[in-house]
Amino acid sequence: MSKDSLTITDNRTGKTYDVPIENGTIPAIALRKIKKDETDFGLMTYDPAFMNTAACKSSITYIDGDRGILDYRGYPIEVLAEEASFLEVSYLLIYGDLPNARELELWEHEIKMHTYVHENLKGFMEGFRYDAHPMSMLVSTVSAMSSFYPEAKDIEDGENRNKQIVRLLAKMPTIAGWSYRHRRGLPYVYPDNDLSYCGNFLSMIRKFSEPKFQPDPILERALDVLFILHADHEQNCSTTAVRGVGSSKADPYTAVSAAAGALSGPLHGGANEAVLVMLREIGDKSRVPEFIKKVKTGEGRLMGFGHRVYKSYDPRAKAIKKLSEQVFEVTGKNPLLEIALELERIALEDEYFVQRRLYPNVDFYSGLIYESMQFPTDMFTVLFAIPRAAGWLAQWLELVNDPEQKISRPRQVYVGPARREYVPIQKR
Protein backbone atom coordinates (compact mmCIF):
# COMPACT_ATOMS: atom_id res chain seq x y z
CA MET A 1 0.00 0.00 0.00
CA SER A 2 1.36 3.43 -0.95
CA LYS A 3 2.04 6.02 1.70
CA ASP A 4 2.65 9.75 1.56
CA SER A 5 6.41 9.68 1.75
CA LEU A 6 9.51 9.92 -0.39
CA THR A 7 12.23 7.27 -0.20
CA ILE A 8 15.70 8.68 -0.78
CA THR A 9 18.78 6.55 -1.30
CA ASP A 10 22.10 8.19 -0.49
CA ASN A 11 24.48 6.68 -3.05
CA ARG A 12 27.45 7.81 -0.95
CA THR A 13 26.52 5.50 1.91
CA GLY A 14 23.87 3.19 0.50
CA LYS A 15 21.44 4.21 3.23
CA THR A 16 17.77 4.93 2.50
CA TYR A 17 15.57 7.48 4.21
CA ASP A 18 11.79 7.97 4.31
CA VAL A 19 10.75 11.61 4.13
CA PRO A 20 7.07 12.50 4.73
CA ILE A 21 5.09 14.31 2.01
CA GLU A 22 2.45 16.84 3.10
CA ASN A 23 0.56 19.21 0.78
CA GLY A 24 2.94 18.37 -2.03
CA THR A 25 6.03 19.33 0.01
CA ILE A 26 8.73 17.65 2.03
CA PRO A 27 10.08 19.23 5.23
CA ALA A 28 13.53 20.58 4.40
CA ILE A 29 14.76 19.86 7.93
CA ALA A 30 14.24 16.13 7.27
CA LEU A 31 17.13 16.23 4.80
CA ARG A 32 19.49 17.02 7.68
CA LYS A 33 19.28 13.34 8.68
CA ILE A 34 21.03 12.38 5.44
CA LYS A 35 24.73 12.38 6.38
CA LYS A 36 27.96 10.76 5.23
CA ASP A 37 28.92 10.21 8.85
CA GLU A 38 28.17 11.56 12.32
CA THR A 39 30.44 14.59 11.84
CA ASP A 40 28.55 15.65 8.71
CA PHE A 41 26.10 18.57 9.04
CA GLY A 42 23.54 16.87 6.81
CA LEU A 43 21.98 17.83 3.49
CA MET A 44 20.38 21.17 2.68
CA THR A 45 18.50 22.35 -0.39
CA TYR A 46 20.10 25.03 -2.57
CA ASP A 47 17.41 27.26 -4.06
CA PRO A 48 18.48 30.78 -5.12
CA ALA A 49 15.49 33.15 -5.41
CA PHE A 50 13.18 30.55 -3.80
CA MET A 51 12.25 29.05 -7.16
CA ASN A 52 10.85 25.90 -5.55
CA THR A 53 10.78 26.50 -1.80
CA ALA A 54 7.66 27.04 0.31
CA ALA A 55 8.52 29.21 3.33
CA CYS A 56 5.05 29.24 4.87
CA LYS A 57 1.54 27.83 4.82
CA SER A 58 -0.98 30.48 3.79
CA SER A 59 -4.74 30.67 3.29
CA ILE A 60 -4.77 34.15 1.74
CA THR A 61 -4.01 33.95 -1.98
CA TYR A 62 -4.07 31.01 -4.38
CA ILE A 63 -2.38 31.08 -7.78
CA ASP A 64 -2.42 28.42 -10.49
CA GLY A 65 -0.09 29.88 -13.09
CA ASP A 66 -0.70 27.17 -15.69
CA ARG A 67 -4.45 27.74 -15.70
CA GLY A 68 -4.38 31.51 -15.16
CA ILE A 69 -6.15 31.40 -11.78
CA LEU A 70 -5.81 33.99 -9.01
CA ASP A 71 -8.11 33.72 -5.97
CA TYR A 72 -8.29 35.79 -2.81
CA ARG A 73 -9.48 33.56 0.06
CA GLY A 74 -11.17 31.32 -2.52
CA TYR A 75 -12.87 34.09 -4.53
CA PRO A 76 -11.83 34.53 -8.20
CA ILE A 77 -10.08 37.85 -8.79
CA GLU A 78 -12.29 38.52 -11.83
CA VAL A 79 -15.45 38.31 -9.71
CA LEU A 80 -14.06 40.53 -6.96
CA ALA A 81 -12.92 43.12 -9.52
CA GLU A 82 -16.40 43.14 -11.05
CA GLU A 83 -18.52 43.07 -7.90
CA ALA A 84 -16.58 44.24 -4.84
CA SER A 85 -14.93 47.41 -3.54
CA PHE A 86 -11.30 47.67 -2.52
CA LEU A 87 -12.10 48.09 1.18
CA GLU A 88 -14.40 45.06 0.99
CA VAL A 89 -11.53 43.05 -0.52
CA SER A 90 -9.09 44.42 2.10
CA TYR A 91 -11.38 43.14 4.85
CA LEU A 92 -11.54 39.76 3.10
CA LEU A 93 -7.75 39.49 2.81
CA ILE A 94 -7.06 40.53 6.40
CA TYR A 95 -9.87 38.80 8.27
CA GLY A 96 -10.61 35.82 6.03
CA ASP A 97 -14.23 36.39 4.98
CA LEU A 98 -16.24 38.98 3.09
CA PRO A 99 -17.92 41.42 5.47
CA ASN A 100 -21.68 41.67 5.76
CA ALA A 101 -23.35 45.05 5.22
CA ARG A 102 -22.97 46.16 8.84
CA GLU A 103 -19.35 44.97 9.11
CA LEU A 104 -18.44 46.78 5.88
CA GLU A 105 -20.11 49.98 7.07
CA LEU A 106 -18.15 49.90 10.34
CA TRP A 107 -14.93 49.00 8.53
CA GLU A 108 -15.26 51.88 6.06
CA HIS A 109 -16.12 54.28 8.88
CA GLU A 110 -13.09 53.17 10.91
CA ILE A 111 -10.75 53.64 7.93
CA LYS A 112 -12.15 57.10 7.22
CA MET A 113 -11.67 58.19 10.83
CA HIS A 114 -7.93 57.49 10.60
CA THR A 115 -7.01 59.13 7.28
CA TYR A 116 -5.46 62.19 8.94
CA VAL A 117 -1.81 62.01 9.99
CA HIS A 118 -0.05 63.74 12.87
CA GLU A 119 1.00 67.30 11.96
CA ASN A 120 4.58 66.47 12.94
CA LEU A 121 4.54 63.71 10.34
CA LYS A 122 3.49 66.32 7.79
CA GLY A 123 6.52 68.35 8.87
CA PHE A 124 8.67 65.24 8.41
CA MET A 125 7.50 64.95 4.80
CA GLU A 126 8.05 68.65 4.15
CA GLY A 127 11.70 68.12 5.07
CA PHE A 128 12.39 66.09 1.90
CA ARG A 129 14.13 67.75 -1.04
CA TYR A 130 11.82 69.40 -3.52
CA ASP A 131 12.56 66.67 -6.10
CA ALA A 132 12.40 63.66 -3.77
CA HIS A 133 11.01 60.57 -5.48
CA PRO A 134 7.44 59.82 -4.24
CA MET A 135 8.32 56.19 -3.51
CA SER A 136 11.31 57.20 -1.37
CA MET A 137 9.03 59.54 0.57
CA LEU A 138 6.44 56.80 1.06
CA VAL A 139 8.97 54.20 2.26
CA SER A 140 10.58 56.64 4.70
CA THR A 141 7.33 58.09 6.02
CA VAL A 142 5.72 54.70 6.65
CA SER A 143 8.82 53.71 8.59
CA ALA A 144 8.70 57.00 10.54
CA MET A 145 5.13 56.23 11.63
CA SER A 146 6.60 53.60 13.92
CA SER A 147 7.94 56.42 16.14
CA PHE A 148 4.53 58.13 16.20
CA TYR A 149 2.76 54.98 17.40
CA PRO A 150 5.25 53.27 19.76
CA GLU A 151 2.49 51.02 21.12
CA ALA A 152 2.57 49.26 17.74
CA LYS A 153 5.55 47.29 19.01
CA ASP A 154 3.20 45.24 21.21
CA ILE A 155 2.29 42.88 18.39
CA GLU A 156 1.04 40.18 20.76
CA ASP A 157 -2.04 42.28 21.60
CA GLY A 158 -4.75 41.48 19.04
CA GLU A 159 -6.72 44.69 19.59
CA ASN A 160 -3.56 46.73 19.23
CA ARG A 161 -2.66 44.90 16.01
CA ASN A 162 -6.03 45.75 14.50
CA LYS A 163 -5.62 49.39 15.42
CA GLN A 164 -2.30 49.56 13.54
CA ILE A 165 -3.79 47.75 10.53
CA VAL A 166 -6.56 50.34 10.30
CA ARG A 167 -4.10 53.21 10.69
CA LEU A 168 -1.81 51.93 7.97
CA LEU A 169 -4.59 51.29 5.46
CA ALA A 170 -6.15 54.67 6.20
CA LYS A 171 -2.98 56.74 6.03
CA MET A 172 -1.32 55.15 2.98
CA PRO A 173 -3.37 57.25 0.49
CA THR A 174 -2.69 60.41 2.52
CA ILE A 175 1.08 59.83 2.50
CA ALA A 176 0.98 58.88 -1.18
CA GLY A 177 -1.09 61.93 -2.11
CA TRP A 178 1.21 64.25 -0.22
CA SER A 179 4.32 62.72 -1.81
CA TYR A 180 2.77 63.54 -5.20
CA ARG A 181 2.04 67.14 -4.20
CA HIS A 182 5.51 67.56 -2.68
CA ARG A 183 7.23 66.54 -5.92
CA ARG A 184 5.25 69.19 -7.77
CA GLY A 185 5.64 71.98 -5.23
CA LEU A 186 1.92 72.02 -4.49
CA PRO A 187 0.29 72.53 -1.06
CA TYR A 188 -0.78 69.35 0.69
CA VAL A 189 -4.51 68.60 0.59
CA TYR A 190 -6.09 67.16 3.73
CA PRO A 191 -8.38 64.11 3.50
CA ASP A 192 -12.07 64.56 2.75
CA ASN A 193 -13.86 61.83 4.66
CA ASP A 194 -17.12 62.40 2.79
CA LEU A 195 -15.48 60.70 -0.18
CA SER A 196 -14.74 57.03 -0.83
CA TYR A 197 -11.29 55.54 -0.26
CA CYS A 198 -10.25 56.10 -3.88
CA GLY A 199 -12.24 59.33 -4.26
CA ASN A 200 -10.42 60.76 -1.25
CA PHE A 201 -7.05 59.82 -2.74
CA LEU A 202 -7.95 61.50 -6.04
CA SER A 203 -9.01 64.58 -4.09
CA MET A 204 -5.63 64.77 -2.33
CA ILE A 205 -3.96 64.49 -5.74
CA ARG A 206 -6.14 66.74 -7.90
CA LYS A 207 -7.85 69.34 -5.68
CA PHE A 208 -6.91 72.97 -6.18
CA SER A 209 -9.09 75.96 -5.33
CA GLU A 210 -12.52 74.36 -5.63
CA PRO A 211 -14.42 74.15 -2.30
CA LYS A 212 -15.27 70.48 -2.87
CA PHE A 213 -13.54 68.04 -5.22
CA GLN A 214 -15.84 65.62 -7.02
CA PRO A 215 -13.99 62.73 -8.66
CA ASP A 216 -15.21 61.34 -11.97
CA PRO A 217 -17.17 58.21 -10.96
CA ILE A 218 -15.69 56.11 -13.80
CA LEU A 219 -12.10 57.02 -12.91
CA GLU A 220 -12.87 56.56 -9.23
CA ARG A 221 -14.21 53.05 -9.87
CA ALA A 222 -11.31 52.30 -12.24
CA LEU A 223 -8.81 53.12 -9.50
CA ASP A 224 -10.80 50.97 -7.06
CA VAL A 225 -10.62 48.01 -9.46
CA LEU A 226 -6.89 48.52 -10.02
CA PHE A 227 -6.41 48.54 -6.27
CA ILE A 228 -8.30 45.23 -5.99
CA LEU A 229 -6.15 43.65 -8.71
CA HIS A 230 -2.93 44.74 -6.97
CA ALA A 231 -3.96 43.98 -3.38
CA ASP A 232 -2.05 40.70 -2.97
CA HIS A 233 -0.11 38.22 -5.05
CA GLU A 234 1.07 35.42 -2.83
CA GLN A 235 4.75 35.10 -1.74
CA ASN A 236 6.42 37.62 -4.05
CA CYS A 237 9.53 39.68 -3.28
CA SER A 238 7.82 42.38 -1.18
CA THR A 239 5.64 39.87 0.68
CA THR A 240 8.74 37.86 1.49
CA ALA A 241 10.25 41.09 2.83
CA VAL A 242 7.25 41.84 5.07
CA ARG A 243 7.27 38.30 6.41
CA GLY A 244 11.04 38.28 6.89
CA VAL A 245 11.09 41.53 8.84
CA GLY A 246 7.88 40.64 10.66
CA SER A 247 9.39 37.33 11.80
CA SER A 248 11.69 39.30 14.13
CA LYS A 249 8.52 40.68 15.78
CA ALA A 250 9.15 44.13 14.36
CA ASP A 251 6.12 46.46 14.38
CA PRO A 252 3.92 46.54 11.24
CA TYR A 253 5.10 49.99 10.12
CA THR A 254 8.69 48.78 9.95
CA ALA A 255 7.66 45.56 8.19
CA VAL A 256 5.45 47.34 5.63
CA SER A 257 8.19 49.91 5.01
CA ALA A 258 10.58 47.06 4.19
CA ALA A 259 8.02 45.58 1.81
CA ALA A 260 7.56 48.95 0.10
CA GLY A 261 11.33 49.20 -0.26
CA ALA A 262 11.36 45.82 -2.01
CA LEU A 263 8.49 46.94 -4.24
CA SER A 264 10.42 50.03 -5.33
CA GLY A 265 12.88 47.93 -7.34
CA PRO A 266 12.40 47.97 -11.13
CA LEU A 267 12.06 44.17 -11.27
CA HIS A 268 9.04 44.29 -8.96
CA GLY A 269 6.94 47.44 -8.87
CA GLY A 270 8.43 49.31 -11.79
CA ALA A 271 7.48 46.94 -14.58
CA ASN A 272 4.52 48.95 -15.92
CA GLU A 273 6.78 51.97 -16.38
CA ALA A 274 9.11 49.76 -18.44
CA VAL A 275 6.14 48.88 -20.70
CA LEU A 276 5.55 52.56 -21.48
CA VAL A 277 9.25 53.06 -22.25
CA MET A 278 9.10 50.11 -24.66
CA LEU A 279 5.94 51.39 -26.39
CA ARG A 280 7.48 54.84 -26.82
CA GLU A 281 10.62 53.30 -28.28
CA ILE A 282 8.51 51.41 -30.83
CA GLY A 283 6.84 54.74 -31.63
CA ASP A 284 4.28 53.60 -34.20
CA LYS A 285 2.00 50.64 -34.89
CA SER A 286 3.76 50.05 -38.23
CA ARG A 287 7.08 49.41 -36.44
CA VAL A 288 5.77 46.58 -34.25
CA PRO A 289 6.84 43.76 -36.66
CA GLU A 290 10.34 45.23 -36.74
CA PHE A 291 10.44 45.30 -32.94
CA ILE A 292 9.19 41.68 -32.74
CA LYS A 293 12.12 40.62 -34.95
CA LYS A 294 14.55 42.36 -32.58
CA VAL A 295 13.03 40.55 -29.60
CA LYS A 296 13.54 37.20 -31.33
CA THR A 297 17.20 37.94 -32.04
CA GLY A 298 17.83 39.18 -28.52
CA GLU A 299 18.24 42.83 -29.56
CA GLY A 300 15.01 43.93 -27.85
CA ARG A 301 13.06 42.93 -24.77
CA LEU A 302 9.32 42.38 -24.66
CA MET A 303 8.09 44.09 -21.49
CA GLY A 304 4.71 43.34 -19.90
CA PHE A 305 4.67 39.76 -21.22
CA GLY A 306 5.41 36.62 -19.25
CA HIS A 307 5.56 36.14 -15.49
CA ARG A 308 7.48 34.03 -12.99
CA VAL A 309 4.18 32.44 -11.93
CA TYR A 310 1.76 32.66 -14.87
CA LYS A 311 2.27 30.41 -17.89
CA SER A 312 -1.04 31.49 -19.41
CA TYR A 313 -2.94 34.79 -19.65
CA ASP A 314 -2.65 36.71 -16.38
CA PRO A 315 -6.27 36.95 -15.09
CA ARG A 316 -5.55 40.47 -13.83
CA ALA A 317 -4.51 41.54 -17.34
CA LYS A 318 -7.91 40.45 -18.71
CA ALA A 319 -9.72 42.61 -16.15
CA ILE A 320 -7.45 45.60 -16.78
CA LYS A 321 -7.86 45.38 -20.56
CA LYS A 322 -11.64 45.58 -20.12
CA LEU A 323 -11.22 48.42 -17.63
CA SER A 324 -9.01 50.40 -20.01
CA GLU A 325 -11.85 50.77 -22.50
CA GLN A 326 -14.02 52.49 -19.86
CA VAL A 327 -11.18 54.79 -18.76
CA PHE A 328 -10.31 55.84 -22.31
CA GLU A 329 -13.92 56.88 -22.89
CA VAL A 330 -13.39 59.53 -20.20
CA THR A 331 -9.75 60.47 -20.75
CA GLY A 332 -9.50 59.92 -24.47
CA LYS A 333 -7.53 57.07 -26.02
CA ASN A 334 -3.90 56.84 -25.03
CA PRO A 335 -1.87 57.25 -28.25
CA LEU A 336 0.24 54.25 -27.22
CA LEU A 337 -2.82 51.96 -27.10
CA GLU A 338 -2.73 51.11 -30.83
CA ILE A 339 0.88 50.01 -30.50
CA ALA A 340 0.03 47.92 -27.42
CA LEU A 341 -2.93 46.21 -29.11
CA GLU A 342 -0.90 45.40 -32.21
CA LEU A 343 1.96 44.08 -30.09
CA GLU A 344 -0.43 41.89 -28.14
CA ARG A 345 -2.11 40.61 -31.31
CA ILE A 346 1.15 39.56 -32.96
CA ALA A 347 2.66 38.09 -29.79
CA LEU A 348 -0.43 35.94 -29.12
CA GLU A 349 -0.37 34.57 -32.68
CA ASP A 350 3.38 34.19 -33.23
CA GLU A 351 4.62 30.64 -32.62
CA TYR A 352 7.84 31.96 -31.04
CA PHE A 353 5.92 33.56 -28.16
CA VAL A 354 3.18 30.92 -27.98
CA GLN A 355 5.77 28.16 -27.46
CA ARG A 356 7.37 30.18 -24.69
CA ARG A 357 3.95 30.81 -23.12
CA LEU A 358 4.48 34.56 -23.04
CA TYR A 359 1.15 36.26 -22.37
CA PRO A 360 0.33 39.82 -21.27
CA ASN A 361 0.63 40.34 -17.53
CA VAL A 362 -0.90 42.93 -15.20
CA ASP A 363 1.73 45.54 -16.08
CA PHE A 364 0.98 45.59 -19.79
CA TYR A 365 -2.16 47.75 -19.59
CA SER A 366 -1.99 49.27 -16.09
CA GLY A 367 0.67 51.82 -17.08
CA LEU A 368 -1.46 52.99 -20.01
CA ILE A 369 -4.41 53.56 -17.68
CA TYR A 370 -2.36 55.41 -15.07
CA GLU A 371 -0.83 57.63 -17.72
CA SER A 372 -4.25 58.39 -19.20
CA MET A 373 -5.41 59.37 -15.71
CA GLN A 374 -2.50 61.86 -15.73
CA PHE A 375 -0.36 60.11 -13.16
CA PRO A 376 3.37 60.65 -13.84
CA THR A 377 5.46 57.50 -14.14
CA ASP A 378 7.24 58.18 -10.84
CA MET A 379 3.88 57.61 -9.10
CA PHE A 380 3.19 54.19 -10.64
CA THR A 381 4.94 52.19 -7.90
CA VAL A 382 3.26 54.32 -5.23
CA LEU A 383 -0.10 53.45 -6.79
CA PHE A 384 0.96 49.81 -6.49
CA ALA A 385 2.00 50.20 -2.83
CA ILE A 386 -1.28 51.72 -1.59
CA PRO A 387 -3.43 48.63 -2.27
CA ARG A 388 -0.63 46.13 -1.70
CA ALA A 389 -0.51 47.36 1.90
CA ALA A 390 -3.71 45.34 2.44
CA GLY A 391 -2.00 42.17 1.26
CA TRP A 392 1.17 42.91 3.23
CA LEU A 393 -0.85 43.42 6.40
CA ALA A 394 -2.84 40.23 5.80
CA GLN A 395 0.41 38.31 5.32
CA TRP A 396 1.98 39.96 8.38
CA LEU A 397 -1.04 39.09 10.53
CA GLU A 398 -1.02 35.50 9.31
CA LEU A 399 2.69 35.26 10.13
CA VAL A 400 2.22 36.63 13.65
CA ASN A 401 -0.56 34.10 14.33
CA ASP A 402 1.30 31.11 12.83
CA PRO A 403 2.79 28.93 15.62
CA GLU A 404 5.12 27.21 13.12
CA GLN A 405 6.90 30.43 12.19
CA LYS A 406 10.18 31.52 13.75
CA ILE A 407 12.59 34.32 12.92
CA SER A 408 13.68 33.96 9.29
CA ARG A 409 17.21 32.63 8.95
CA PRO A 410 18.05 31.04 5.57
CA ARG A 411 21.05 28.76 5.33
CA GLN A 412 23.93 29.38 2.96
CA VAL A 413 26.41 27.28 1.01
CA TYR A 414 29.81 28.58 2.07
CA VAL A 415 32.23 28.74 -0.90
CA GLY A 416 34.96 30.92 0.64
CA PRO A 417 38.49 29.94 1.67
CA ALA A 418 39.18 27.30 4.31
CA ARG A 419 40.44 28.44 7.71
CA ARG A 420 43.71 30.39 7.35
CA GLU A 421 46.48 31.56 9.62
CA TYR A 422 46.49 35.26 10.40
CA VAL A 423 49.59 37.00 9.00
CA PRO A 424 50.78 40.15 10.80
CA ILE A 425 50.72 43.23 8.60
CA GLN A 426 54.52 43.52 8.69
CA LYS A 427 54.83 40.15 6.93
CA ARG A 428 52.17 40.62 4.29
Image (spheres, helix red, strand yellow):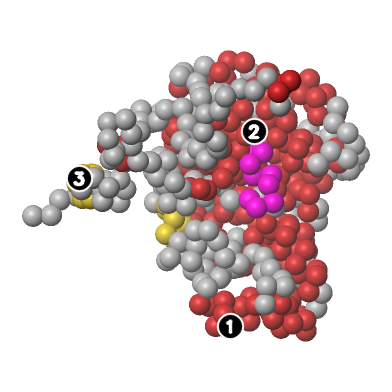
What residue lies at 81% left-to-right and 41% top-to-bottom? 133
At mark 1, the secondary structure is loop
Q: Amino acid at mark 3?
A: Lys
Residue named by callout 1:
350
Report the span colored magenta: 260-268
Q: Is residue 31 above or below residue 118?
A: below
Q: Amino acid at mark 2?
A: Ser
Q: Are marks 2 and 1 in contact (CB under 8 Å)?
A: no
Q: Is residue 171 above or below residue 333?
A: above
Residue named by callout 3:
15
- Asked if residue 264 lies in the magenta stretch, the reply is yes
Q: Earlier in the sequence, mark 3 or mark 1?
A: 3
- Quarter in which the C terminus is drawn: top right
Residue named by callout 2:
257
The answer to whether residue 259 of the structure is visible from this angle is: yes
Query: Cα distance, mark 3 to mark 1?
Result: 51 Å
- Asked if residue 272 lies in the magenta stretch, the reply is no
At mark 2, the secondary structure is helix
Q: Is residue 42 left or right of residue 185?
A: left
Q: Are marks 3 and 1 in contact (CB under 8 Å)?
A: no
What residue lies at 71% left-to-right and 71% top-to-bottom? 300
In the rendered structure, find residue 29 and report the number of the disc placed on it. none
